[in-house]
Amino acid sequence: MEYERLARLLVERGLPVTAAAVHGHLVGRLAGGERLSGDALERALVAALESEPARAEPLLEDLADCYRAERSALASGELSFRPLLPGDDVPLGRRVEELAAWCRSFLSGFGAVVAGGEQLSADARELLADLGQIAQAGFGGEAVEADERDFVEVAEYVRIAALNLHAECAPAREGEAAGEARE
């Protein structure tokens, strides 16, 4: 799904979240190892939209497709996953805001799946702390070329952090789920 399309759909439905925030939440849940379908997926999508089911319903099929596509992208090992953010034609200040919103929502989604964090490696805890710092980012003033480069580097760091958290947490959760299914 493209950022602009999801943003337009959210505005049309009068929903209070941004496209980056919705995407970040879904990816955070996936990175934490969650694998949903059916009614459970629908409830998670409604929660990501911060809406009641009736207002969210027209978007659920598109978001379920997005969830499944990101699940495949994260698991593919091809590093094709990308956070859903506005394009380079959007002013840098707005892109920084959306990256921060993506990180906040990623942490929220991840936290909904991975309680505590005591079972996480030191590297994973550091990545989460870094995402927490990026979630507080803001930008004021006139953008210069160095600011654009810095933004690209930070966005790439966020992408790699999400992939690494997924690589650590998703296989462990899938193993737990397989063990529960056998019992």
Image: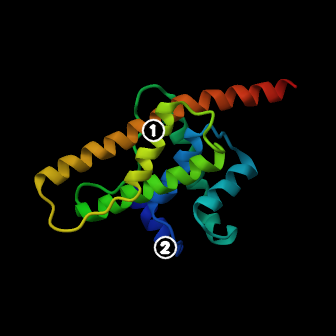
Query: In the figure, is residue 144 to the left or right of 114?
Result: left
Asked if residue 125 shows in the view, the reply is yes
Query: In the figure, is residue 129 to the left or right of 41?
Result: left
Q: Marks 1 and 2, Cα distance to the nearest angstrom?
A: 38 Å
Mark 1 highlights which residue?
Answer: 126
- Mark sitting earlier along the chain (1/2): 2
Residue 49 appears in which quarter of the rendering? bottom right
Depth order, front residue of 111/62: 111
The local secondary structure at tag 1 comes to helix
Depth order, front residue of 48/158: 158
Q: Position of residue 64 (x, y in %)?
A: 60, 50
Q: Quadrant of the C terminus?
A: top right
Which numbered dot is residue 12?
Answer: 2
The local secondary structure at tag 2 comes to helix
- Which amino acid type corresponds to the residue marked 1 in the rendered image? Glu
- Which amino acid type corresponds to the residue marked 2 in the rendered image? Glu
Q: Sort mark 2 into few (<14), some (14-19) or many (20+) by Cα contacts within 10 Å.
A: few
